[in-house]
Amino acid sequence: MAGNAVLVVGAVIAAGIVIDYGVRAIKPAFTSTSSTSSSSTPATAAPAIGSQSTGLAGADAMLAAATAASAANAVIPYSTSVNTTGLLAGFRSDCSGFVSWVVSHADPSFGDQTTDTIPSTPGVSAGAGQYVTLWDRPQAGAAGHVIIEILGQWFESGGDTNTTSSGGPTEISQAQAETEIQGGMSAYHLAGM
């Protein structure tokens, strides 16, 4: 399928295929079943880290990344160590590492942030965004937590309401997100998002 082009109206991930806006090639979302730093299996091909992108295009890039990581949850355990291979290579798979990886698909300069550095990161402001909102409890260690809302869908890694087997990246319901937000989280947004 790699050479085929399709015209679509949205970004969709199904059966390991990313279909992006416009007339573009269909490309695999991921190619392996492992992404932990200690794995000896081949690295997973991540959706490409994007170029600076704002608005709906940036949100779509982040949503495609978050959805791909959530789909690969069974092989991405929660970890505070930087992944050396796999879908999140170069990032941690704890809450802030995962959110940093997702944001990097629209803003590669965002870097690998922690819950306590997100509010002071260049380009981040207090308040909800139009397309993307980072809900953060900016405290160090286990006291901190961050979740991300992208176009009305919610994602996290770890957290009190996470019921997945690995504790890694997963999509959560709005009700789960609201419960976490009530635990002292504040809204932040990225410039142009």
Image (tube, grey):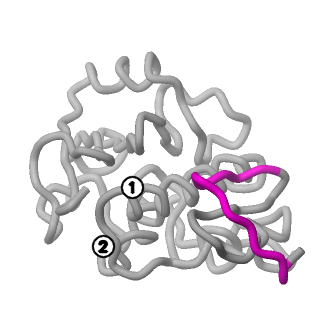
Residue named by callout 1: 96
Q: In the image, which residues are magenta?
A: 2-14
Query: Could you say where residue 178 lies in the image, as x and y percent from the top left?
Result: 35, 20
Screen quadrant of the C terminus: bottom left
Q: Is residue 173 magenta?
A: no
Residue named by callout 2: 110
Disc 1 and disc 2: Cα gap in Å?
12 Å
* First of labels 1, 2 by sequence position: 1
At label 1, the amino acid type is Ser
Query: Could you say where residue 140 lies in the image, as x and y percent from the top left?
Result: 26, 51
Screen quadrant of the N terminus: bottom right
Q: Is residue 12 magenta?
A: yes
Residue displayed at 41% across by 45% down: 150
Disc marking residue 147:
none
- Mark 1 and 2 residues: CB-CB less than 8 Å, in contact? no
Q: Is residue 129 left or right of residue 2?
A: left
At label 2, the amino acid type is Phe
User: Does dot 1 land on a helix, a strand or a loop?
Assistant: helix
